[in-house]
Amino acid sequence: KELKVLPSTASQVASTRMTSYDQIELTTAGDNVWYSFTKVNPKKLFGFIPVSVVSQTRVSAEDSTQVKSSRSWWSFLAF
């Protein structure tokens, strides 16, 4: 498929959900193509157990819409 969205444009769309990112990756699955932005945040689970919380946002490479945003289910316990 043809990419109609540049990474810089996709980054602006992803910035609505995440302030920064560690990695950007172009991913395909079937007919879908998207940019995947990943951020790993060091946190403390229950305030004393060190953990890494992974946040991910996917932006369509065809029309720059946000496809999905997710993070670890237990991330609300880490601060």
Image (cartoon, rainbow, N blue to C red):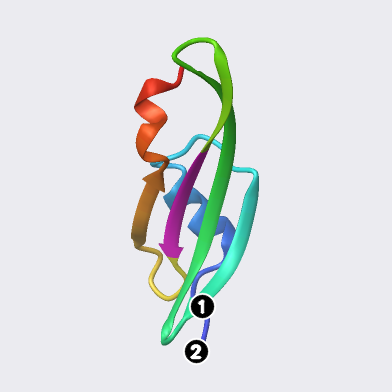
How many marks on residues? 2
Provide the secondary structure element on which disc 1 rests: strand
What's the distance in space between the residues labelled 2 and 1, CA to CA?
10 Å
Per the rendered image, the range of residues in magenta is 54-59
Residue 53 in the magenta stretch? The answer is: no
Question: Can you give x and y, in whole percent of width and height, for residue 20 in the image?
Answer: 56, 37
Q: Residue at x 44, y 59 (%)?
A: 58
Q: Which residue in the structure is indicated by mark 1? A: 28
Considering only order in the chain, which callout, 1 or 2, is on the residue closer to the N terminus?
2
Amino acid type, label 2 = Lys
Q: Evaluate if marks 2 and 1 touch, with contact meaning CB atoms under 8 Å apart.
A: yes
Q: Is residue 67 above or below residue 12?
A: below
Question: Can you give x and y, in whole percent of width and height, for residue 25 in the image?
Answer: 61, 63
Q: Is residue 33 above or below residue 77?
A: below
Q: Nearer the viewer, residue 72 or 2?
A: 72
Q: Image quadrant of residue 22?
A: top right
Q: Which residue in the structure is indicated by mark 2? A: 1
